[in-house]
Image (spheres, rainbow, N blue to C red):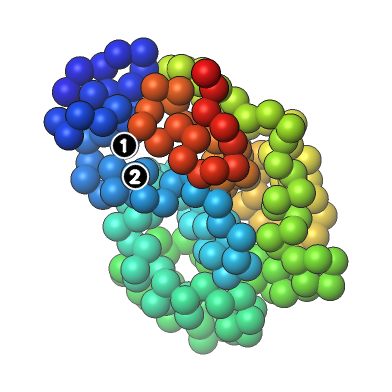
Amino acid sequence: MSETDGTVLCEDGLRRPPWAARDPLLREYYDTEWGMPVHGEAELFERLVLEGFQAGLSWATILRKRPAFREAFAGFDPDAVAAFGAPDVDRLMADARIIRNRRKIDAAIGNARATVDLRAEGGLPQLIWSHRPERTPEPRTVDEVPSRSPESEALARELKRRGFRFVGPVTVFALMEAVGVVDTHLVGSHRRGSSGVWESPP
């Protein structure tokens, strides 16, 4: 593999950012999922919860545990998670397959309830996608990829106002990247513009 203009030329002849070039799991995620538009409520709730659990950990760790997270959190059905009570918290805290952090578990349940409540105001998908910027970044190197934006700061404020937790502007920006609201694929990557939301720069 060789690096040029911030991307890594992989053995399959495709260029990816360094974070997605070496680990097969991360490469699969990058090539098929990351940055593609997500509009479903449960799917966005899942991404929001997992971004919160990721804080302080690697994304590869989250991906490896995602099947267990999905099982433990009822497929990330907001209604089901919103109904979780003390026995469910005890069950989750005893589940070694997931990340057993009480504050993050409590936040996930609270965020499910906030997601359900938000339906009366248009729902989680509408709120997230309403913060799509007029322009998306066009980073050529990893150093040029922002970690937050005015839109992520505004969305974080709105989410917190509606009772969501673990939704700081950096976490929210990572969510926006992951679900296609912004495109931070490096310009030299084979995935740049793949979401169909943003055109690739000339």
Q: Secondary structure beneath disc 1?
A: helix
Give percent across and percent down for residue 56.
Answer: 45, 43
Q: Secondary structure beneath disc 2?
A: helix
As shown in the figure, which amino acid type bears the numbered disc 1? Answer: Ala
- Name the residue rendered at 29%, 57% in the picture: 64
Say the numbered circle drawn on residue 31.
2
Residue identifier under label 1: 20
Left or right? Give the position of 11 relative to 79.
Answer: left
Give percent across and percent down for residue 159.
Answer: 74, 54
As shown in the figure, which amino acid type bears the numbered disc 2? Answer: Asp
Number of residue marks: 2
Left or right? Give the position of 193 relative to 63.
Answer: right
From where the camera sits, is residue 74 visible? yes
From where the camera sits, is residue 103 visible? no
- Name the residue rendered at 76%, 49% in the picture: 130
Binning the other alpha carbons within 10 Å of mark 1 as few (below 14), some (14 to 19) or many (20 upward) gives many
**Pointers 2 and 1 in contact (CB under 8 A)?**
yes
Compared to residue 195, the image places residue 110 above or below, namely below
Q: Residue 100 appears in which quarter of the rendering?
A: bottom left
Say the numbered circle drawn on residue 73.
none
Binning the other alpha carbons within 10 Å of mark 2 as few (below 14), some (14 to 19) or many (20 upward) gives some
Compared to residue 2, the image places residue 66 above or below, namely below
